[in-house]
Amino acid sequence: MRQIQYFMQLKISWLSVCFLFLLATWSCNNSNEENTTEQNSIDSQENAQNPLQDLNERIAQDSTNANLYFVRASKYAEMSDWENAGKDIYAAIQIDSTQENYYLLGADIFLQAAKSKAALQLLAYGEKNVANAQNILLEETKILLITKQYDEALAKCNQILGGNVQNPKVYFYKGLIEKEMGQNAHAIESFQRAVEYNPDYYDALMQLGLLFSENKNNLAIGYFDNAIRVDSSRNEAFYAKAMFYQNDRQYEKAKNTYREIIRQSPQNHNALYNIGYVLIQQDSIAKAANYFELATRMNPAYAEAYYMRGLCAEKMNDTATALNYYKQALNFNNELTPALEAIQRLKNE
Protein backbone atom coordinates (compact mmCIF):
# COMPACT_ATOMS: atom_id res chain seq x y z
CA MET A 1 0.00 0.00 0.00
CA ARG A 2 3.02 2.33 -0.20
CA GLN A 3 1.75 3.78 -3.47
CA ILE A 4 -1.61 4.64 -1.95
CA GLN A 5 0.01 6.26 1.08
CA TYR A 6 2.05 8.41 -1.30
CA PHE A 7 -1.10 9.90 -2.75
CA MET A 8 -2.80 10.37 0.57
CA GLN A 9 0.16 12.47 1.65
CA LEU A 10 -0.65 14.69 -1.30
CA LYS A 11 -4.26 14.89 -0.19
CA ILE A 12 -3.38 15.62 3.43
CA SER A 13 -0.80 18.26 2.63
CA TRP A 14 -3.36 20.83 1.57
CA LEU A 15 -4.86 20.91 5.05
CA SER A 16 -1.80 22.54 6.58
CA VAL A 17 -2.00 25.37 4.07
CA CYS A 18 -5.67 25.57 3.17
CA PHE A 19 -6.05 28.78 5.07
CA LEU A 20 -2.90 30.58 3.83
CA PHE A 21 -5.17 31.94 1.04
CA LEU A 22 -6.36 34.37 3.75
CA LEU A 23 -2.98 36.11 3.63
CA ALA A 24 -3.16 36.52 -0.14
CA THR A 25 -6.63 38.11 -0.35
CA TRP A 26 -6.23 41.25 1.73
CA SER A 27 -8.16 44.21 0.48
CA CYS A 28 -8.66 47.77 1.53
CA ASN A 29 -12.35 47.79 2.42
CA ASN A 30 -12.13 50.30 5.23
CA SER A 31 -13.27 53.45 3.39
CA ASN A 32 -15.09 55.86 5.67
CA GLU A 33 -18.56 57.07 4.75
CA GLU A 34 -17.32 60.31 3.25
CA ASN A 35 -14.79 58.60 0.99
CA THR A 36 -17.31 55.96 -0.09
CA THR A 37 -19.92 58.58 -1.02
CA GLU A 38 -17.44 60.57 -3.06
CA GLN A 39 -16.07 57.45 -4.79
CA ASN A 40 -19.58 56.29 -5.72
CA SER A 41 -20.32 59.73 -7.13
CA ILE A 42 -17.16 59.63 -9.19
CA ASP A 43 -17.84 56.09 -10.39
CA SER A 44 -21.25 57.07 -11.70
CA GLN A 45 -19.79 59.90 -13.77
CA GLU A 46 -16.80 58.15 -15.30
CA ASN A 47 -16.51 57.75 -19.02
CA ALA A 48 -17.09 54.07 -19.82
CA GLN A 49 -14.35 53.94 -22.45
CA ASN A 50 -11.76 55.78 -20.36
CA PRO A 51 -12.45 55.35 -16.63
CA LEU A 52 -9.62 57.75 -15.75
CA GLN A 53 -10.68 60.63 -17.97
CA ASP A 54 -13.14 62.20 -15.56
CA LEU A 55 -10.76 61.74 -12.63
CA ASN A 56 -7.90 63.35 -14.56
CA GLU A 57 -10.10 66.35 -15.32
CA ARG A 58 -11.28 66.64 -11.72
CA ILE A 59 -7.71 66.49 -10.40
CA ALA A 60 -6.63 69.15 -12.91
CA GLN A 61 -9.38 71.41 -11.53
CA ASP A 62 -8.88 70.50 -7.85
CA SER A 63 -5.28 69.37 -7.35
CA THR A 64 -5.43 69.62 -3.56
CA ASN A 65 -8.28 67.11 -3.14
CA ALA A 66 -6.57 64.13 -1.51
CA ASN A 67 -9.51 61.81 -1.99
CA LEU A 68 -9.43 62.27 -5.77
CA TYR A 69 -5.86 60.95 -5.79
CA PHE A 70 -6.97 58.10 -3.51
CA VAL A 71 -9.79 57.14 -5.88
CA ARG A 72 -7.51 57.33 -8.92
CA ALA A 73 -4.93 55.21 -7.12
CA SER A 74 -7.67 52.62 -6.59
CA LYS A 75 -8.47 52.68 -10.30
CA TYR A 76 -4.83 52.27 -11.25
CA ALA A 77 -4.61 49.35 -8.81
CA GLU A 78 -7.60 47.71 -10.49
CA MET A 79 -5.66 48.02 -13.75
CA SER A 80 -2.52 46.53 -12.11
CA ASP A 81 -0.69 49.80 -12.85
CA TRP A 82 1.24 49.72 -9.59
CA GLU A 83 3.64 52.53 -10.47
CA ASN A 84 0.95 55.15 -11.07
CA ALA A 85 -1.13 53.77 -8.21
CA GLY A 86 1.83 54.28 -5.88
CA LYS A 87 2.41 57.83 -7.12
CA ASP A 88 -1.20 58.78 -6.53
CA ILE A 89 -1.40 57.29 -3.06
CA TYR A 90 1.74 59.18 -2.09
CA ALA A 91 0.15 62.36 -3.45
CA ALA A 92 -2.97 61.73 -1.37
CA ILE A 93 -0.92 61.19 1.80
CA GLN A 94 1.14 64.34 1.18
CA ILE A 95 -2.08 66.33 1.11
CA ASP A 96 -3.79 64.53 4.01
CA SER A 97 -1.66 62.22 6.13
CA THR A 98 -4.40 61.39 8.65
CA GLN A 99 -6.53 59.02 6.56
CA GLU A 100 -6.14 55.36 7.53
CA ASN A 101 -7.55 54.18 4.19
CA TYR A 102 -4.76 55.79 2.25
CA TYR A 103 -2.10 53.82 4.09
CA LEU A 104 -4.00 50.54 3.80
CA LEU A 105 -4.45 50.97 0.06
CA GLY A 106 -0.83 52.03 -0.31
CA ALA A 107 0.38 48.95 1.54
CA ASP A 108 -1.75 46.72 -0.67
CA ILE A 109 -0.37 48.40 -3.80
CA PHE A 110 3.22 47.85 -2.67
CA LEU A 111 2.51 44.24 -1.74
CA GLN A 112 1.04 43.59 -5.17
CA ALA A 113 4.19 45.12 -6.64
CA ALA A 114 6.30 42.75 -4.46
CA LYS A 115 7.64 45.62 -2.36
CA SER A 116 6.89 44.47 1.18
CA LYS A 117 9.60 46.67 2.71
CA ALA A 118 8.04 49.79 1.17
CA ALA A 119 4.63 48.66 2.43
CA LEU A 120 5.95 48.35 5.98
CA GLN A 121 7.67 51.73 5.80
CA LEU A 122 4.46 53.37 4.64
CA LEU A 123 2.43 51.75 7.42
CA ALA A 124 5.00 52.77 10.02
CA TYR A 125 4.56 56.36 8.86
CA GLY A 126 0.81 55.92 9.11
CA GLU A 127 1.13 54.75 12.73
CA LYS A 128 2.47 58.19 13.61
CA ASN A 129 -0.21 60.17 11.79
CA VAL A 130 -3.49 58.26 12.25
CA ALA A 131 -5.31 58.80 15.54
CA ASN A 132 -6.50 55.21 15.99
CA ALA A 133 -4.05 53.05 14.07
CA GLN A 134 -5.25 49.57 15.05
CA ASN A 135 -6.06 48.56 11.47
CA ILE A 136 -2.68 49.83 10.33
CA LEU A 137 -0.98 47.81 13.07
CA LEU A 138 -2.97 44.74 12.02
CA GLU A 139 -1.92 45.22 8.40
CA GLU A 140 1.69 45.44 9.53
CA THR A 141 1.17 42.21 11.44
CA LYS A 142 -0.08 40.45 8.31
CA ILE A 143 2.88 41.59 6.23
CA LEU A 144 5.38 40.65 8.92
CA LEU A 145 3.75 37.23 9.12
CA ILE A 146 3.87 36.59 5.40
CA THR A 147 7.49 37.76 5.25
CA LYS A 148 8.29 35.43 8.17
CA GLN A 149 9.31 38.14 10.59
CA TYR A 150 7.54 36.32 13.40
CA ASP A 151 8.94 38.05 16.47
CA GLU A 152 8.12 41.48 15.04
CA ALA A 153 4.65 40.30 14.03
CA LEU A 154 3.98 38.97 17.53
CA ALA A 155 5.11 42.27 19.01
CA LYS A 156 2.57 44.11 16.81
CA CYS A 157 -0.21 41.79 18.02
CA ASN A 158 0.66 42.50 21.63
CA GLN A 159 0.77 46.22 20.88
CA ILE A 160 -2.78 46.11 19.51
CA LEU A 161 -4.04 43.96 22.36
CA GLY A 162 -2.67 46.52 24.79
CA GLY A 163 -5.41 48.86 23.57
CA ASN A 164 -8.15 46.32 22.82
CA VAL A 165 -7.93 42.91 24.46
CA GLN A 166 -11.19 41.74 22.86
CA ASN A 167 -10.11 41.95 19.23
CA PRO A 168 -10.75 38.50 17.67
CA LYS A 169 -8.82 39.31 14.47
CA VAL A 170 -5.66 40.02 16.43
CA TYR A 171 -5.94 36.75 18.33
CA PHE A 172 -6.46 34.96 15.03
CA TYR A 173 -3.28 36.37 13.52
CA LYS A 174 -1.46 35.82 16.77
CA GLY A 175 -2.46 32.17 16.48
CA LEU A 176 -1.19 31.98 12.90
CA ILE A 177 2.15 33.44 13.97
CA GLU A 178 2.50 31.02 16.87
CA LYS A 179 1.57 28.13 14.60
CA GLU A 180 4.27 29.13 12.12
CA MET A 181 6.74 29.32 15.02
CA GLY A 182 5.84 25.76 16.01
CA GLN A 183 4.13 26.88 19.21
CA ASN A 184 0.93 24.92 18.63
CA ALA A 185 -0.25 24.99 22.25
CA HIS A 186 -0.07 28.79 22.29
CA ALA A 187 -1.69 28.91 18.85
CA ILE A 188 -4.64 26.88 20.11
CA GLU A 189 -5.06 29.29 23.02
CA SER A 190 -5.05 32.27 20.67
CA PHE A 191 -7.54 30.74 18.23
CA GLN A 192 -9.79 29.82 21.15
CA ARG A 193 -9.68 33.43 22.36
CA ALA A 194 -10.65 34.55 18.85
CA VAL A 195 -13.65 32.19 18.94
CA GLU A 196 -14.49 33.31 22.47
CA TYR A 197 -14.93 36.89 21.23
CA ASN A 198 -16.50 35.82 17.93
CA PRO A 199 -18.15 32.36 18.05
CA ASP A 200 -18.80 32.53 14.29
CA TYR A 201 -15.16 33.12 13.33
CA TYR A 202 -14.98 30.53 10.54
CA ASP A 203 -11.24 30.71 9.93
CA ALA A 204 -10.39 30.40 13.62
CA LEU A 205 -12.71 27.41 13.95
CA MET A 206 -10.99 25.78 10.99
CA GLN A 207 -7.54 26.38 12.40
CA LEU A 208 -8.58 24.81 15.69
CA GLY A 209 -10.00 21.81 13.86
CA LEU A 210 -6.78 21.38 11.89
CA LEU A 211 -4.57 21.66 14.96
CA PHE A 212 -6.61 19.13 16.93
CA SER A 213 -6.60 16.88 13.86
CA GLU A 214 -2.82 16.86 13.91
CA ASN A 215 -3.04 15.47 17.46
CA LYS A 216 -5.75 12.97 16.45
CA ASN A 217 -8.00 14.62 19.00
CA ASN A 218 -11.76 14.14 18.54
CA LEU A 219 -12.33 17.77 19.51
CA ALA A 220 -11.47 18.50 15.88
CA ILE A 221 -14.87 17.24 14.75
CA GLY A 222 -16.69 19.74 16.96
CA TYR A 223 -14.73 22.64 15.50
CA PHE A 224 -15.31 21.45 11.94
CA ASP A 225 -19.03 21.07 12.67
CA ASN A 226 -19.13 24.62 14.01
CA ALA A 227 -17.36 25.88 10.90
CA ILE A 228 -19.99 24.10 8.79
CA ARG A 229 -22.71 25.72 10.93
CA VAL A 230 -21.22 29.15 10.19
CA ASP A 231 -20.85 28.55 6.44
CA SER A 232 -22.04 25.28 4.95
CA SER A 233 -21.41 26.49 1.39
CA ARG A 234 -17.65 26.02 1.71
CA ASN A 235 -16.08 22.61 1.27
CA GLU A 236 -12.98 22.99 3.47
CA ALA A 237 -14.64 21.99 6.73
CA PHE A 238 -16.40 19.00 5.19
CA TYR A 239 -13.17 17.86 3.58
CA ALA A 240 -11.11 18.27 6.75
CA LYS A 241 -13.76 16.43 8.76
CA ALA A 242 -13.78 13.57 6.25
CA MET A 243 -9.98 13.38 6.33
CA PHE A 244 -10.06 13.15 10.12
CA TYR A 245 -12.44 10.19 9.92
CA GLN A 246 -10.42 8.63 7.12
CA ASN A 247 -7.12 8.87 9.00
CA ASP A 248 -8.86 7.49 12.09
CA ARG A 249 -10.15 4.56 10.01
CA GLN A 250 -13.76 5.55 10.59
CA TYR A 251 -14.40 4.77 6.96
CA GLU A 252 -18.20 4.88 6.84
CA LYS A 253 -18.23 8.33 8.45
CA ALA A 254 -15.53 9.45 6.04
CA LYS A 255 -17.51 8.28 3.01
CA ASN A 256 -20.69 9.92 4.27
CA THR A 257 -18.89 13.23 4.73
CA TYR A 258 -17.33 13.06 1.27
CA ARG A 259 -20.82 12.41 -0.11
CA GLU A 260 -21.99 15.62 1.53
CA ILE A 261 -19.32 17.43 -0.49
CA ILE A 262 -20.48 15.72 -3.67
CA ARG A 263 -24.10 16.68 -2.98
CA GLN A 264 -22.95 20.30 -2.89
CA SER A 265 -20.40 19.99 -5.69
CA PRO A 266 -21.20 16.99 -7.91
CA GLN A 267 -18.02 17.55 -9.94
CA ASN A 268 -15.65 17.57 -6.96
CA HIS A 269 -13.04 15.12 -8.23
CA ASN A 270 -11.06 15.13 -4.98
CA ALA A 271 -14.03 13.87 -2.95
CA LEU A 272 -14.71 11.18 -5.57
CA TYR A 273 -11.05 10.17 -5.47
CA ASN A 274 -11.02 9.90 -1.68
CA ILE A 275 -14.16 7.77 -1.59
CA GLY A 276 -12.31 5.48 -3.96
CA TYR A 277 -9.35 5.41 -1.59
CA VAL A 278 -11.59 4.54 1.38
CA LEU A 279 -13.23 1.75 -0.61
CA ILE A 280 -9.80 0.25 -1.29
CA GLN A 281 -9.18 0.21 2.46
CA GLN A 282 -12.44 -1.72 2.76
CA ASP A 283 -11.33 -4.15 0.02
CA SER A 284 -14.10 -2.98 -2.33
CA ILE A 285 -11.79 -2.77 -5.33
CA ALA A 286 -14.43 -2.80 -8.08
CA LYS A 287 -16.44 -0.04 -6.38
CA ALA A 288 -13.26 1.95 -5.82
CA ALA A 289 -12.44 1.68 -9.52
CA ASN A 290 -15.84 3.20 -10.34
CA TYR A 291 -15.13 6.23 -8.18
CA PHE A 292 -11.68 6.74 -9.68
CA GLU A 293 -13.29 6.53 -13.11
CA LEU A 294 -15.77 9.23 -12.05
CA ALA A 295 -12.88 11.34 -10.78
CA THR A 296 -11.16 11.18 -14.18
CA ARG A 297 -14.45 11.97 -15.87
CA MET A 298 -14.76 15.12 -13.77
CA ASN A 299 -11.08 15.94 -14.26
CA PRO A 300 -9.73 14.32 -17.44
CA ALA A 301 -6.15 15.37 -16.56
CA TYR A 302 -6.22 13.78 -13.08
CA ALA A 303 -2.99 11.77 -13.24
CA GLU A 304 -3.26 10.35 -9.72
CA ALA A 305 -6.76 9.02 -10.37
CA TYR A 306 -5.57 7.26 -13.54
CA TYR A 307 -2.83 5.68 -11.48
CA MET A 308 -5.39 4.46 -8.93
CA ARG A 309 -7.53 3.06 -11.75
CA GLY A 310 -4.45 1.15 -12.83
CA LEU A 311 -3.86 -0.07 -9.30
CA CYS A 312 -7.43 -1.33 -9.08
CA ALA A 313 -7.10 -3.10 -12.42
CA GLU A 314 -3.85 -4.69 -11.27
CA LYS A 315 -5.49 -5.90 -8.06
CA MET A 316 -8.23 -7.46 -10.19
CA ASN A 317 -5.51 -9.25 -12.24
CA ASP A 318 -6.16 -7.21 -15.40
CA THR A 319 -2.55 -6.41 -16.21
CA ALA A 320 -3.15 -5.03 -19.70
CA THR A 321 -5.73 -2.52 -18.46
CA ALA A 322 -3.56 -1.60 -15.50
CA LEU A 323 -0.61 -0.89 -17.77
CA ASN A 324 -2.79 1.29 -19.98
CA TYR A 325 -3.98 3.40 -17.04
CA TYR A 326 -0.45 3.77 -15.67
CA LYS A 327 0.63 5.09 -19.06
CA GLN A 328 -2.32 7.47 -19.13
CA ALA A 329 -1.26 8.78 -15.74
CA LEU A 330 2.19 9.52 -17.15
CA ASN A 331 0.63 11.37 -20.08
CA PHE A 332 -0.55 13.97 -17.59
CA ASN A 333 2.39 13.79 -15.19
CA ASN A 334 5.49 12.16 -16.60
CA GLU A 335 7.24 12.38 -13.22
CA LEU A 336 4.61 10.41 -11.29
CA THR A 337 6.93 8.04 -9.45
CA PRO A 338 4.38 5.34 -8.46
CA ALA A 339 3.19 5.05 -12.06
CA LEU A 340 6.76 4.75 -13.32
CA GLU A 341 7.49 2.10 -10.70
CA ALA A 342 4.28 0.23 -11.51
CA ILE A 343 5.08 0.06 -15.22
CA GLN A 344 8.57 -1.20 -14.48
CA ARG A 345 7.20 -3.76 -12.05
CA LEU A 346 4.72 -5.12 -14.60
CA LYS A 347 7.39 -5.31 -17.29
CA ASN A 348 9.61 -7.36 -14.99
CA GLU A 349 6.92 -9.88 -14.22
Image (cartoon, grey):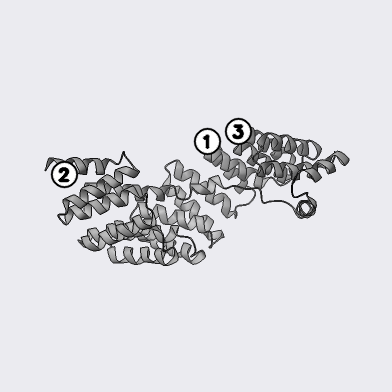
- Residue most extreme to the right: 61
Foreground residue among 92 and 62: 62
Residue kind at label 3, given as amino acid type: Lys
Which residue sits at x=22%, y=62%? 286
- Can residue 32 be seen here? The reply is yes
Tell me residue 27's x, y (percent). 62, 48
**Amino acid, disc 1:** Gln
Q: Is 116 on the left-hand or right-hand side of 32?
A: left
Residue 143 in the image: state x and y as whole percent.
57, 40
Q: Residue at x 54, y 51 (%)?
A: 171
Question: In the displayed structure, would residue 21 be above or below residue 295?
Answer: above
Residues at marks 2 and 1, CA–CA distance in whole angstroms: 50 Å
Q: Nearer the viewer, residue 139 or 280?
A: 280
As drawn, is 282 to the left or to the right of 254?
left
Closest to the observer, 274 or 228? 274
Number of residues whose C-alpha sits closer than 10 Å to that of mark 2, classed few (under 14), some (14–19) or many (20 or more):
few
With 220 as the anchor, is 318 left or right in this view? left
Residue bearing the label numbered 1: 149
Q: Cα distance, mark 3 to mark 1?
A: 15 Å
Instruction: Work out whether residue 199 or residue 110 is closer to the camera in this orientation and state it.
Output: 110
Q: Which picture quadrant has residue 156?
A: top right
In what quadrant of the picture does the C terminus appear?
A: top left
User: Looking at the picture, does residue 148 appear above or below residue 228?
Assistant: above
Taking the spot 14% from the left edge, 54% from the top edge, the residue there is 317
Q: Which residue is mark 2?
A: 346
Q: Considering only order in the chain, which callout, 1 or 2, is on the residue closer to the N terminus?
A: 1
What residue is shown with label 3? 115
Q: In terms of secondary structure, where does tag 2 sit?
A: helix
Q: Extreme left residue here?
A: 349
Q: First in sequence, mark 3 or 2: give its number.
A: 3
Question: Residue 51 placed where, x, y %?
Answer: 74, 46
